[in-house]
Image: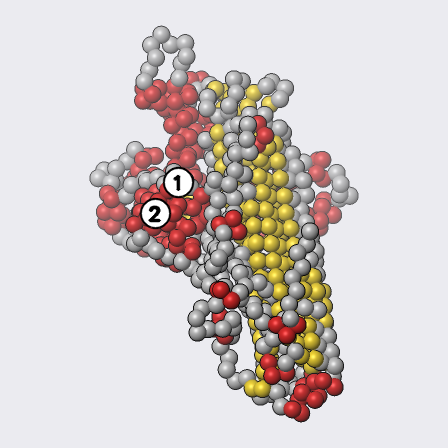
Amino acid sequence: MSKIKKGNINRLGFDFIPEEFVSNGRDENYLRFEQNPKLDYRKLTPEEIVILVQNDNRADDWGNIQVSTSFIPNQIKHNNFFGLVRIGDMAPIYLEYRNLKLESGIYNSTIVSCDLGDHVAIHHVRYMAHFIIGNEVLLSNISEMETSSTAKFGNGILREGEVEQLRIALELCNENGIRSILPFDGMQAADAYLWTRNRQDHQLQKRFKEITEKRFTKTRGSYSVIGDRCIIKNSQNIKNVKIGSDAYIKGINKLKNLTINSSPEAYTQIGEGCELVNGIVGYGCRIFYGVKAVRFVLSSFSQLKYGARLINSFLGDNSTISCCEVLNSLIFPAHEQHHNNSFLCAAMIMGQSNMAAGATVGSNHNSRAADGEIIAGRGFWPGLCVSLKHNSRFASYTLLVKGDFPYEMDIKIPFSLVNNDVKNDKLTIIPGYWFMYNMYALIRNANKYEVRDKRLLKNQYLEYDILAPDTVNELFNAIKMIEHAVGSDDNAEIQLSKEETIHRGKTKLTHGGDQVPSVVHMSGFEHSKRKVEIVKIQEAYSLFKRFIKYYGTIHLIDFLIKHRYEDLRIKMRDCQRKDWENIGGQLIEKDAIQHLLNGVKSGEIDHWEDVHKNYHELSRGYPETKLAHALASLLEITGESAETLNVEVIKSWLIEAIEHKRWMVKEIYESRAKDYQNPFRNMVYNSTEERDVVVGSLEDNSFILQQRQELIDFEMSVGNLISVL
């Protein structure tokens, strides 16, 4: 049964805040006046009231209508006013946006206790209560705009007198809600990551909640805000919203309990049929065509389109989700998911990822409860119609072949292709697949994400390079796993220790030839009793070592261009290959993360701004710490030491780096050329000329030309360095 309240018509514009929550000596408007401190309002003159009444306006009390000095009563027609309404400057002008031209003023609307900015155009707003409207705002054909005294604008806080059950939380990474976090305006992917981890540390979890609540007052009475130069038209219900300047909103069904960030440099647009509830929208976002988002954070310059559903999820910067459904997931920056029948649930996807059509990442019903999780390193790419089971984990740049994967997996080797061989009932893994067969896509994607990073303030370093501390550490671990697998001999009479087995495998792999099997079996990659085959072992092993060496050498080159050779040896003495972690797209040494968390727990770090400042400081120092990691990796993979290093060794490294770069550019070209040599791709064109018109000429490919030019520049730069040495 609906509970309908009744009240005196003279109180329609008042009692916004319940009396018990109004502080002594204040009235219900004090927060409103703090939000809009403009003072140059005046009362209406008797002549102005007469004109307003003649124009079919009415008010419960004309004494509650305040206006600025430049007031034009003839631009206010057919309206109802209740409570205290304050109207800014007016002028005999019209406002135009994208061919919509509206006379400035207020027409055919009901306004309840609102502040209206300068030179606004408000037409056919059937009910608007407790809003602060900025300057030069266009509002046209809107059904409802209302605000409650407990409005939280998408933040996970409570107002005075509210019970805990009313708090909004994001149930990330797991459907059981145990990894829940409290959203707040300004939240970064790194914040969400750190908060969802370490659930056993109750003190840390308590501190995250405390510093979130400190950002906001519990006091009731904040008004909804529409920023300067916003356009909202042909829309239904808008409630409890804070909208930044220059936003463009049209045809929405519902906006409720939201902060929508927008600015002249990064304006946000929300289009037809969208329903957004309990969320934070970042700067420069695009949300169009039937999107449904509930309990969410959408980071800056991201897009939701074509009926996408985003529920209980965090989507990082520069990402796009179209058509599909995403639930209970934490997604780092630069994520792409475009297809109607893809599904992502209870997952942490660590950026630079792409979900193909039909990918079902999160069939967690193999568990006895809805509590499964999937973790995927950056560069994750499940192919067409892939179906995965919780719990599963994937190293960086894992590519999954089309198919249903019937068991939980732990893919520990990066840059791998993983295939469920149904016919032979086995799991097949090709380590280093990207290096062997698709260098074009691998390098192009890294460049693409960097170009698409539209953040206005890039004070948090998001890593897009395929070779970075996280992936290189994974390559080192993979090398040890391969050595151990090759060195194992289940038929031997005497079983070797792990170190002896690794040494034996390393010896075989180093010498190559018939000693290295074409296929090895490994355990721990799949929760099953069937075979897991690792193929092309020798090629992968050699490529992993080459790429680690190249990673170290290119950073050595950058250092030598700016410093003396003597400085290099000093630098190398102190460098170490430490453990790193990807927190929201930013790579940080684990020691530094623990130091940050200790600061939060101790109270030394007491605001999210201080946490973010820590990210920014670590970002500024990232090139230096990455250099130390790269140099340490170079020494480790070559077996050299800073003490024994000499110029001839360095020259040999530089020459190898040039050769490796040449090989990469050659592979980039040849992997793309396969598409032009495939007769089945060519058969749909009546000639090679038509093909080149439709898909572009291979020889004119801008990315290939760019890579060739970079190679020329690299050869010249390194050649000069060799001559100097």
From this view, report whether residue 504 is shown above or below residue 225.
above
Instruction: From the image, tell me which residue sits under label 2.
Output: 597
From this view, report whether residue 90 is shown above or below residue 366.
below
Q: Which residue sits at x=39%, y=54%?
A: 211
* Residue 665 visible here: no
In terms of depth relative to the viewer, which is nearer, 666 or 228?
A: 228
From this view, report whether residue 261 is shown above or below residue 209.
below
Q: Earlier in the sequence, mark 2 or mark 1?
A: 1
Instruction: Please state the horizontal and vertical placement of residue 225, each as a whole percent of the image.
Output: 56, 68
Instruction: Please state the horizontal and vertical placement of residue 374, each as a whole percent of the image.
Output: 51, 35
What residue type is disc 1 on? Asn
From this view, report whether residue 541 is shown above or below residue 245.
above
Crowd class of label 2 (few under 14; some 14 to 19; many from 20; radius 10 Å)? some
Task: Tell me the element at label 1.
Answer: loop
In terms of depth relative to the viewer, which is nearer, 497 or 652?
A: 497
Task: Tell me the element at label 2.
Answer: helix
* Residue 146 visible here: yes
Q: What label does residue 707 carry, if any?
A: none
In terms of depth relative to the viewer, which is nearer, 437 or 15?
A: 15
Instruction: Please state the horizontal and vertical placement of residue 139, each as a whole percent of the image.
Output: 67, 70
In this view, which residue lies farthest toward the right? 686
In this view, which residue lies farthest toward the top? 493
Q: Which residue sits at x=70%, y=89%?
A: 50
Instruction: From the image, tell me which residue sits under label 1.
Output: 198
In terms of depth relative to the viewer, which is nearer, 659 or 180?
A: 180
Instruction: Please state the horizontal and vertical placement of residue 647, each as a whole percent of the image.
Output: 27, 43
Q: Which residue sits at x=71%, y=69%?
A: 126
What residue type is disc 2 on? Leu
Spatial CA distance of label 2 from label 1 is 10 Å
Pointer 2 and pointer 1: residues touching (CB < 8 Å)? yes
